[in-house]
Amino acid sequence: MMSLWKKIVYPSIAISDDKLSRHLAGKWVVVTGATSGIGEALTLRLIHAKANLYLIARNEQKLIDLCHQAKENGCEACYDVIDLRQREQLDTLCGALRERFPAVSYLFCNAGKSINRTINDSIDRMHDFDRTMDLNYRSMVALSLALMPALRKAKGRIVYTSSVSSRYPFIPGWSAYHASKCAANAWCRTARREYKQLGVKVQIAYMPLVHTPMSDVNERYKNMPAYSADEAACILLRLAMSGKFCYKPWWAI
Ligand SMILES: NC(=O)c1ccc[n+]([C@@H]2O[C@H](COP(=O)([O-])OP(=O)(O)OC[C@H]3O[C@@H](n4cnc5c(N)ncnc54)[C@H](OP(=O)(O)O)[C@@H]3O)[C@@H](O)[C@H]2O)c1
């Protein structure tokens, strides 16, 4: 019964290695949140496709390992360790990035954090709202602005990992997460129209449930059918290679 439910609600997503290599080999791709879950699975697919990688996250050992793996496979690879919630650090990084890459074909803005806490339980926790906003929204905008010249040069794409839950009536307990995801959605929808003239495409993946360290913290979600991190990576890659503005599951109205 569970596997039938999985097949219907989360139909399998595949992508051919040949197609990925054709689109990505030798191109510069930026991935935020590359060290875990969806971002890590995406990075492994990109390594296999021989893309050149610039990776961003906090876990340095994981970044070193991924870059090592990429170089062993013939890709160029580099990384920066940064807490994307720290505005000063991010501003410094963005200043340096303006000059660093001549051309970037894909910017996957994927780093994110969810918080499950009711507003009433957040009375002394304004930082929950600041942190989700800084990570899920502000860092995406800052990196998009900093990399815009390089994205224009490559006629590149910005791909944002949003959540399908941001398209539905909001469930109590997720106000900080939903507000930050909706802010990012709104920015992407506007940027999509403005950047069209510049040759840069902006895309949103309204991701359903995916089994990752983030979602599996929640016991209820851990046992529900969901996509794997690799399937979610395939969703991002298929979107990035398509002419569509967004991905959403077939059942999302
Ligand atoms: N899993 C789901 O069901 C689901 C559903 C819809 C949308 N999404 C979205 O998918 C994206 C990826 O989530 P995931 O499920 O793959 O989660 P995950 O396994 O927890 O991965 C999150 C990634 O973001 C990075 N990150 C977290 N805080 C950071 C910070 N302050 N500064 C820099 N990097 C930071 C983490 O790296 P470090 O810890 O090394 O910094 C990690 O690489 C998120 O935007 C999430 O909202 C997930």
Image: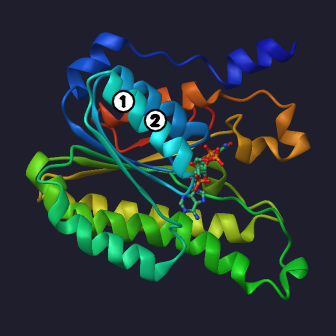
The C terminus is located in which quarter? top right
Q: Residue at x 54, y 72 (%)?
A: 85
Tally the numbered discs.
2
Disc 2 residue type (three-letter): Leu
Residue 202 seen in the figure: yes
User: Residue 38's x, y, as percent?
Assistant: 56, 38
User: Residue 217's x, y, as percent?
Assistant: 82, 46
Disc 1 residue type (three-letter): Ala
The dot on residue 202 is: none
Looking at the image, do the residues carrying marks 1 and 2 touch, with CB atoms under 8 Å apart? Answer: yes
In this image, 54 relative to 140: left or right? left
* Category of crowding for the residue at label 1, using alpha-carbon neighbours closer than 10 angstroms: few (below 14), some (14–19), many (at least 20): many
Q: What residue did someone put label 2 on?
A: 66
Q: Within the image, what quadrant is residue 123 found in? A: bottom right
Q: Is residue 59 above or below residue 6?
A: below
Q: Residue at x 83, y 31 (%)?
A: 224
In this image, 224 relative to 180: left or right? right
User: Residue 11's x, y, as percent?
Assistant: 61, 19
- Specify whether tag 1 is near ligand 1 (CB below 8 Å): no
Q: What residue did someone put label 1 on?
A: 70
The N terminus is located in which quarter? top right
| Element carrying mark 1 | helix
Display coloring: rainbow
- Specify whether tag 2 is near ligand 1 (CB below 8 Å): no
User: Residue 150's x, y, as percent?
Assistant: 16, 56
In this image, 79 relative to 223: left or right? left
Distance Cα–Cα, label 1 vs label 2: 6 Å
Nearer the observer, 246 or 214: 214
Q: Is residue 10 above or below residue 115?
A: above
| Element carrying mark 2 | helix
